[in-house]
Amino acid sequence: MKPVLQVALDLMHLKRAVDIAKEAVEGGADWIEAGTPLLKSEGAEALRVLKRTFPDRVIIADMKTMDVGGFEVEIAAKAGADVVSVLGLADDDTISEAVLTARQYGAKIMVDLIGVTDRVTRAQRAEELGASYVCLHVGIDEQMRGGGSPVEILGKVAAAVSIPVAVAGGITSETAPLLLDAGASIIIVGGSIIKTEDVAGAARQVKQSMRERRSISSVTSRKYGAEELFEAFARASTCNIADAQHKSGVMKGIVPRIERGAKMVGRALTVQTTKGDWAKPVEAIDRAVDGDVLVIDAGSSDIAVFGELAAWSCRTKGVRGVVIDGAVRDLDGIYAMGFPAFSRYIAPNAGEPKGYGGIGHEIICGGQPVRTGDWIVGDDSGVIVIPQERAVEIANRAVDVAEREDRIREEIKRGGTLSRVQELEKWEQIR
């Protein structure tokens, strides 16, 4: 089978999906997939519209059917689907009924192995039951947590079956050739195409990498690991991260004291002190390492516990910034040196270094619990804390939010408005 580029339209709005699909086809997409979110949002009408719009393309209905296989395949096939997905976790009878019904309507079945433990055995059984394709799939939520690549098992599955193998899960122009070499015939790409400003260009790049069997560098929809978190959080704004964390982690009342456009990213070194006591904040600098952010609980005091000399000390140690639930002073000097500072208050008066408090304890800053090792991001919009155990997931989700906003921004620039692009009136909540 000649390698196929399948573009997954994992979107909510049909009009946007069709517009993006047109650009993807312009870039060389072979198959067009009505993603599961689109089908749940718009129903079988999405398949009808896609088939009318792209009569010369194979239309995939990513139904992820788990039960009543025959009935769901009939719905999809009658609406224009050429291929319908059924979950490999489904009962054999469900897959069998789906295959028999698909034959009646001239469609084919792709068995999606997402969540299956023994994918080789299940792929073989899917072929025995009459499936035309199997799909190795790393789900989006698993990708966000830093889940593995399908290439690890792809070769074994491809060797075990004679039907074409599709592969999906965070694929880009960098990874597509590797998957083809490992045995894939169908490359399913979603985010790295549909979230870009230039969909046609992104599709063209993936297609080129498949045709030439060589990786082509791309940062779009890249998934980040633990060693790349500074880079990931630098790409996302605090607003993106707040959306990714469902509004949690936002520090209240902590105001940016930075030049416009400045950014702070680092891991928290926590400090607890009392009103005006700047001893522990300054001592903490000696314990800090490159990449740390000092997060100081000063009891919301209006007497400064941090100033320009402390900022210069931070600079020599590689400290990326300071967040104070209290007051900062010498702001003119701190601005001049470009050191990121965030605080509740500004005050010219400092207290005395008495040495109360501690370093490395769990604290409350801006109403949020912070532990040493948590990630801290600050920009013009404020400061947010990311729990260290969720950092990889939140970084990937935040970058995903940023990329989706990039695409929406591009659609607005082309003459739309936010309400029209998002079809707000259609999707207003009904109580």
Image: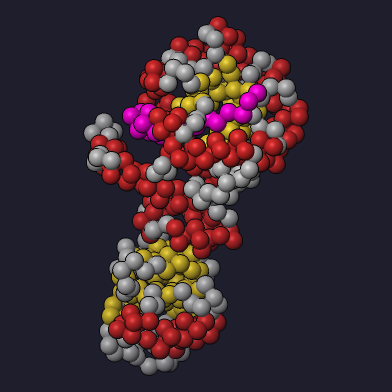
Q: Residue at x 58, y 40 (%)?
A: 209
Q: How is the image coloured?
A: secondary structure
- Inspect this view and state whether residue 170 appears: no
x, y percent for residue 178: 66, 41
Q: Is 3 in the magenta?
A: yes
Q: Quadrant of residue 152?
A: top right
* Above-or-below relation of 184 to 235: above
x, y percent for residue 116: 65, 33
Left of 193 or right of it: where is 177?
right
Q: Residue at x 41, y 33 (%)?
A: 23
Quadrant for the C terminus, please. top left
* Above-or-below relation of 353 to 202: below
Q: Residue at x 42, y 57 (%)?
A: 236
Left of 307 or right of it: where is 284?
right
* Above-or-below relation of 265 to 112: below
Q: Quadrant of residue 17?
A: top left
Instruction: Give the magenta part as a residue range.
Output: 1-20
Quadrant for the N terminus, please. top right
x, y percent for residue 156: 75, 34
- Inspect this view and state whether residue 147 appears: yes
Q: Is 167 in the magenta?
A: no
Which residue reaches farthest top? 104
